[in-house]
Amino acid sequence: KLPASLTQFDKLTIYLAGNKISEIADGLCLKEGWMKDQVAQFKCDAILCPPGTYSKYGRQHDVKSQCDSCPIGGTAPYYGSSECFSEEDVQSFSERTILKEFFQATDGTNWKASDNWMNSDESICSWFGVTCVSSTEESIVSIHLSQNGLNGTVSSTLFQLPNLVEINLSGNNVLIDYTEINNPIPLEYLNIDSTGATTINGIAHSMNNLKLLHATDNEFPSFPSAIMHLTNLEVLYLSNNNLKGEIPPAIHNLKNLTYFACSACAFNGELPTWLGDLQRLEYIDLDKNTLSGPIPIELTQLSTLKHLDLSDQISQGGLGLNGTLPDFSSLPELMELSLMNNQISGSIPQSFLGGVDASNLILIDLRKNELSGSIPTTLTAITSMNFYVADNKIDDIPQEVCAMSWNEAISVDNCDHILCPVGKFNDLGRSTPSESCVSCPNANLTIHYGSTECLEDLEKDILNGFFTATSGKEWTNKDNWLSDSDVCNWYGISCHAEGEKKGHVQSIRLSGNGLVGDIPSDIFGLVHMDLLEVKHNKVSISFDQVQNAVSLMTLHLSQTRVKSIEGLSKAPNLRSLHMTSNEITGPIPEEIYLLTNLQRLYLNYNKYSGTLSKKNWTD
């Protein structure tokens, strides 16, 4: 718009033809002294020809240069046109202008590829990364410029491209302004993966047609609430964002969702039962979060589900999914199921995968759980399957299962392609054409099928980590630690001398030995250890893995730096607890009352307060 502020000038000559002037302010056309007094004779036309008209100079300066109306089929959309265009030409000109602005705003001269961009002799349809409606219609439908070195802020103007349905700017350092999108747009696909995005505010009411949203590897501080309004969304990628908190209930509104991926999103809490209401879901990927609790039965009844990945809810600091293994027999389309690295326990149900289409290649990953018992013979109905179940507590494999050519086995002479037998191991817990199961030095060093390491190696790894975390190099006595000798010969370590536990760590006694630091909670992975004594040291400890210490009966932590016993109630067999002279404050922790096997308790010289509960002690 030509602003009214210019009325302050009585004598002004200003040439503006060939711009995108859409309005002339009231009063300017009354300035008769303007344009060398030509406004007195030709009024507004002396400044600029109005829309729908044109002249050679974009204005009238004498009686022969009047502003003429555009012929039928032509148009001049702005003030000051020197020629008329077809509707198609106007649209192309407008879209070209938008692309030029986009190029300049994102440091286009430094793009990795920019073929034909800014070349006025080339159709915009030939510009790198740009696709048009057709060879005869010069209107943009998609822009794909992923990992192309864009850098800057993308204006909302880009979304004025009237036929744009796809944008892929992934892998560029760009921020996109959605706030000035005033009307609904036809966009269906938006990919802003790895752009550093922190917000998508503004898309809620303008992108109702959006079906696919890729926004992985960004910096959203929480779950973007604008997504909840995208009710036509079918595919949602949000993995590798630190969203925190529970899975937002408002996702329940996305009834058309078929694909939901939020791996490593820092989700916690339990899996919501309402996921079972999203009846079009085919793909769910929620691995590497810190979800807990059992798998809800509602999730196992999504008849359209093909891929479910809930693996590894532990490595980011979570406790893992628990409870028993559902049979997933109501999922006929299921082809991939991954529940690796959780705390799922009990036996594999006889009805496991009973309803799946056995003609498909099925991938099942149940590694690193607490599953026990046998592999059901009913699974032999599935002829093509990769079935991974190492690092559990499987103690039997029926011959019918061994005869299956699962896991791409070349030979089925034994069961090794399913799981390494007791007394053997390898990195996968099963044999492959390139890696056989190998024997442990002592057959007692594995007690289940599918071991990925001998317990001797596992115990040594745990003790090495313990040594490093507690400043082992500064210990008063560290004889044989980190050496190649048997851990049973390391200072302070005693091992079982006979029976099935022979050679495994039985106790650690390192009182007053100069330990300093945080004892890793995986010390409780020493499953045959019955005593841990580290009193008179400057150490603290977390109990978040104490449930693994199934043999632990005596724990000496007096005169250390322990300030909390949160999680200790999960110690399954603790009999004697020594916690004197620490810095634990407040009332007697409720965790104490849950140690139902406890026989000796020493809490002297702490900073407890409050009243002892008679009920808790007598119960």
Image (cartoon, rainbow, N blue to C red):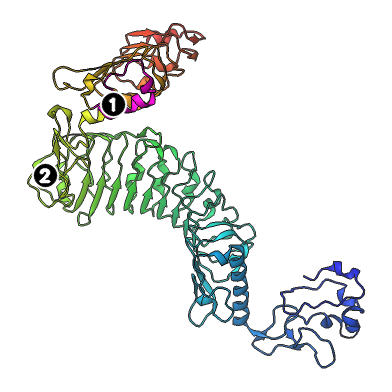
Residue 222 position in % (x across, y down): 53, 43
Q: Dot 1 corresponds to which residue?
A: 482
Measuring from the top left, give residue 465's x and y in whole percent. 33, 28
Q: Is residue 159 left or right of residue 489?
A: right
Q: Is residue 530 visible?
A: no
Q: Which range of residues does the magenta coloring cover?
A: 459-483
- Which quadrant is home to the C terminus? top left
Secondary structure of residue under mark 2: helix
Q: At label 2, which amino acid type do we have?
A: Cys
Nearest to viewer (mark 1 / mark 2)? 1
User: Is 569 left or right of 45, judged from the image as shown?
Assistant: left
- Is 479 rendered above or below residue 151? above
Instruction: Indicate the quadrant containing the N terminus: top left, top right, bottom left or bottom right.
Output: bottom right
Identified at 25% across, 47% down, the residue is 364
**Could you classify mark 1 by the number of other residues whose Cα lies within 10 Å: few (under 14), some (14-19), or many (20 or more)?**
some
Which element carries disc 1, helix, strand or loop? loop
Say if the magenta span includes residue 410.
no
The residue that appears at 71% across and 74% down in the rendered structure is 20
Q: Residue at x 59, y 73 (%)?
A: 95
Q: Which residue is mark 2?
A: 402
Q: In terms of depth relative to the viewer, which is nearer, 76 or 294?
A: 76
Left or right of 9, for residue 352: left
Q: Percent x, y for residue 24?
A: 80, 73
**Inter-mark Cα distance, 1 to 2:** 40 Å
In the image, taking residue 41 as reference, residue 201 lies left or right, namely left
Q: Nearer the viewer, residue 544 or 152?
A: 152
